[in-house]
Amino acid sequence: MYTMNVSADGFIADREGAFAWSEPSEEQFRRHLAETRELGGFLCGRKLYETMLVWETDPAMRSDELGAAFADAWGALTKVVFSRTLDAVQGNARLAEGTLQGEVATTAGSTVAIGGAGLAAAAIELDLVDEFHLFRHPIFVGGGTPYLPPVTEDRHLRLLETTTFQGVIYESYARAR
């Protein structure tokens, strides 16, 4: 599963790498929490790992009940980090020891999310992503990091769900096989 916040024009970060426009409403945050609790693992690149590490290291993230619940769920989630520059990781994470295909294979039988555009692009090209979940925000950023990479062949999808959260549209799709 590949889940990210996305601008209306398809970017997960703007031209400067910023994504403050994707701050979730309480209702949307509860959906993120529910999805996180259902995961058996999370594969990510260095940037997303470093962005999300605050949920395991910063006590301020537990300032309310919802934040504390997400911090607990995120902290309990096993994370595998793909990085060419990190020598060590913190929290409930480990550095990837093998290939992307190999790491996905070790999680067979559980729901695993892939986060980060670069890693997701590789997983999509290798046909490892079964579901795509987007929280589409009502903003055009005009460029930046795209949610989806260019693909070498058509990938047909089947709509699973749409939900609206105060102007943000949640869309989930499964690969049509």
Image: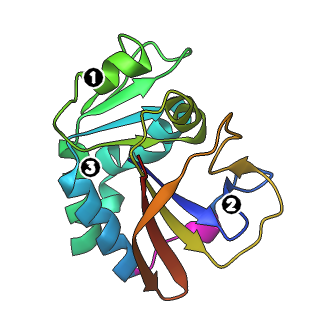
Q: Position of residue 63 (x, y in %)?
A: 29, 69
Q: What residue is pinned by disc 3? A: 74
Query: What type is the residue that disc 2 sits on?
Result: Gly
As for residue 22 lying within the magenta part, the answer is: yes
Query: What type is the residue that disc 3 sits on?
Result: Trp
In the foreground, 127 or 32: 127
Among numbered discs 3 and 1, the one appearing first in the sequence: 3
98 left or right of 138 in image: left
Q: Name the residue located 58 percent from the left edge and 35 percent from the top edge.
A: 121
Q: Name the residue located 24 percent from the left edge and 33 percent from the top edge.
A: 92
Q: What residue is pinned by disc 1? A: 105
Q: CB under 8 Å between callouts 2 and 1?
A: no
Query: What type is the residue that disc 1 sits on?
Result: Ala
Give me the C-alpha separation between circle 2 and circle 3.
Answer: 26 Å
First to last magenta residue range: 20-25
As for residue 123 lying within the magenta part, the answer is: no
Give me the C-alpha separation between circle 3 and circle 1.
Answer: 22 Å
Residue count near mark 1 (Cα–Cα under 10 Å), binned few <14, some 14–19, many ≥20 = few
Among numbered discs 2 and 3, the one appearing first in the sequence: 2
Looking at the rendered image, the disc whose residue lies closer to the viewer, 2 or 3, is 2
State the image quarter where residue 18 is shown: bottom right
In the foreground, 93 or 172: 172
Q: What residue is pinned by disc 2? A: 10
Considering the numbered disc 2 on the image, is that residue within a helix, a strand or a loop? Answer: loop
Residue count near mark 3 (Cα–Cα under 10 Å), binned few <14, some 14–19, many ≥20 = many
